[in-house]
Amino acid sequence: MKKVMIEFKDFSFQYRAQQEPTLQGINLTIVEGEKVLIVGPSGSGKSTLAHCINGLIPFAYKGEISGSLRVIGQEQKDLSIAELSNQVGTVLQDPDGQFVGLTVGEDIAFSLENHVVQQTEMKSKVAAAARAVDIHEFLASSPQELSGGQKQKTSLAGVLVGDVDILLFDEPLASLDPYTGTKAIELIDRVHKETGKTVIMIEHRLEEVLHRAVDRIIVIHEGRIAADMPAAELLSTTLLSEVGIREPLYLTALKYAGCSITANMNPQHVNDIELEACSNKLKIWYECNQSRQDKLENPPILELRDISFGYEKNQQVLDKLNLCIHKGEMVCIAGRNGAGKSTVSKLICGFYKPSSGSIRMHGRDIAQDTIKERAERIGFVMQNPNHMISKTLLYDEVALGLRLRGCPEELVRERVHQVLKVCGLYVFRSWPISALSYGQKKRVTIASILVLEPEVIILDEPTAAQDYRHYNEMMEFLLTLRGQGMTVIMITHDMHLMLEYADRAIVLADGVKLADDSPERILTNTDVVKKANLKETSLFALAIKAGLKQPEEFVRRFIAYDRRSRGG
Ligand SMILES: Nc1ncnc2c1ncn2[C@@H]1O[C@H](COP(=O)(O)OP(=O)(O)OP(=O)(O)O)[C@@H](O)[C@H]1O
Ligand SMILES: Nc1ncnc2c1ncn2[C@@H]1O[C@H](COP(=O)(O)OP(=O)(O)OP(=O)(O)O)[C@@H](O)[C@H]1O
């Protein structure tokens, strides 16, 4: 009999600020050495469940607990937070929320210091963990100097270096570029296999997390366990789409072609899937469908000409970068962690000044425009919602910009309510923001910019922590605004988003533009994919596996069909 590591029995939890329990009737046992994935829509209670396991509930977040939760045989409520942190190592959803060291190296070493490890051993362990997640060049940097993905890598290295029995990852992939995300999943898998530790992962990016096998998937829906079964079984049901979670793209493609998915086809990975009964249907579907035509371009709205920039002397983050965004376009900017994507938006918004080159809007150089003047026309939604929120109540946060512009309160109310409805936040309108999940907070920051109806909106990782339903609703709303002339720039590591919604993708690498083309051409270009740490779409792999002669064209036809089926 394997040792029981986590055991919830008739467990419920209600936050002090809530009227209803957030978790209800949870019965869940996780045994030693298991690798479990937890999925569920935004706000379903995944992070709450994780916080119960690592002790943030009840130590940091107060509320009412009923039933029992045992961690390695002991009632969680009888353990101190220090005892729990010796057993459970956590990577939190918000990497800023857990920095303790002044440098990356100190931060990674923190859990070792708790265990009184020799200095030399500590150094080599920290270096090895940093190398494993490719952050070793930044060991002496302060966390403030890191890009979002680099912070996430530091947190990952921090738990991997420690000596705990249970590893808990809350959306470990959210800010990682696709290649690094794949490496992180491989690394977690390797640690799991080599050490036999118990691994619990919460993740929205299902297709990417299933790159390496998990023992089972637990689906949380409205605070309850809606399913607990192996991946192959779950993917052959309609449960995921019923609760609003996206299935892997290759399965969507197979369904479009009229194939039914069964557990014995091994649907959990595109490389393993058995296609014998499907290849012909896919070929027929391919023959019967057309790809879309490239659109004609409007005049440029925003141009970056020969932009160079570094945060410090002798640092060259951007090197004579040229970019052109056309009015009414929906463009993605992609590239590996630290490529300079967020830096580009900070320069456009005027937070920093380029060392050379010019930024033009409607052909006019905006070098002399203040941050405030730029903000009236260019809205910017930052990567981390906790960096943007300044008000206590959700309504006030979304109303803030309109109020600052002197908008009459009646109109503020009308516009705020309208945008809250579209962003799926209307039911929370009178809530304090502290009572929202990370994904919900992210939507608040998007709503607070959308309500101002800017000419150009720049969204840094808009889909991070969003479930499929909210993702679609928000993207469809952005499409409507785009139809009314708004220009949308999205910085993203989400290859699905790029394929499904972007007219064009611009790829940055080494401070310059590596590629500028349609998303489907970029994601089927092996050279660009490799250089920029992107990931080829699984549609491409599916087409090759099914023996289709032109896999790139299959991807294009899928995208065209998918957009038509969504009314686009
Ligand atoms: N500190 C808190 N105080 C009160 N309520 C909270 C708090 N944190 C979360 N909640 C509520 O609990 C519910 C579940 O939140 P949780 O963060 O567990 O969701 P999640 O499934 O992890 O979502 P996401 O995928 O968006 O991160 C949310 O509806 C939220 O309103
Ligand atoms: N305040 C800062 N001081 C010094 N260096 C910084 C600062 N902010 C970012 N950098 C560095 O500039 C480079 C580009 O960072 P940026 O945040 O633009 O990357 P990114 O492409 O948005 O990355 P990610 O995908 O990880 O969010 C990185 O190497 C980062 O370490």
Image (spheres, grey):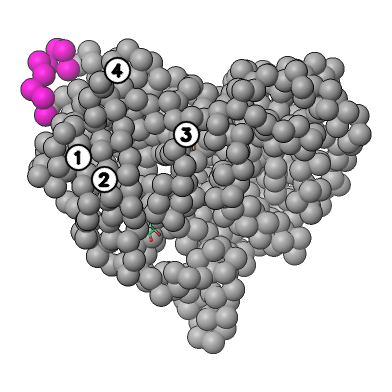
Q: Residues within 10 Å of mark 4 (few under 14, many from 20)?
A: some
Indicate which disc residue 70 carries.
1
Q: CA distance from mark 4 to mark 3?
A: 21 Å
Q: Nearer the viewer, residue 264 or 21?
A: 264
Q: Earlier in the sequence, mark 4 or mark 3?
A: 4
Residue at 27% of width from left, 50% of height from top? 11
Q: Earlier in the sequence, mark 2 or mark 4?
A: 2
Indicate which disc residue 196 carries.
4
Indicate which disc residue 9 carries.
2
**Which residue type carries mark 4?**
Gly
Image position, residue 267 (x, y; %): 61, 26
Disc 1 + disc 2, Cβ < 8 Å: yes
Image position, residue 564 (x, y; %): 81, 48
**Which residue type carries mark 3?**
Met
Which segment did they paint magenta? 114-122
Q: CA distance from mark 2 to mark 3?
A: 18 Å
Q: Earlier in the sequence, mark 1 or mark 2?
A: 2
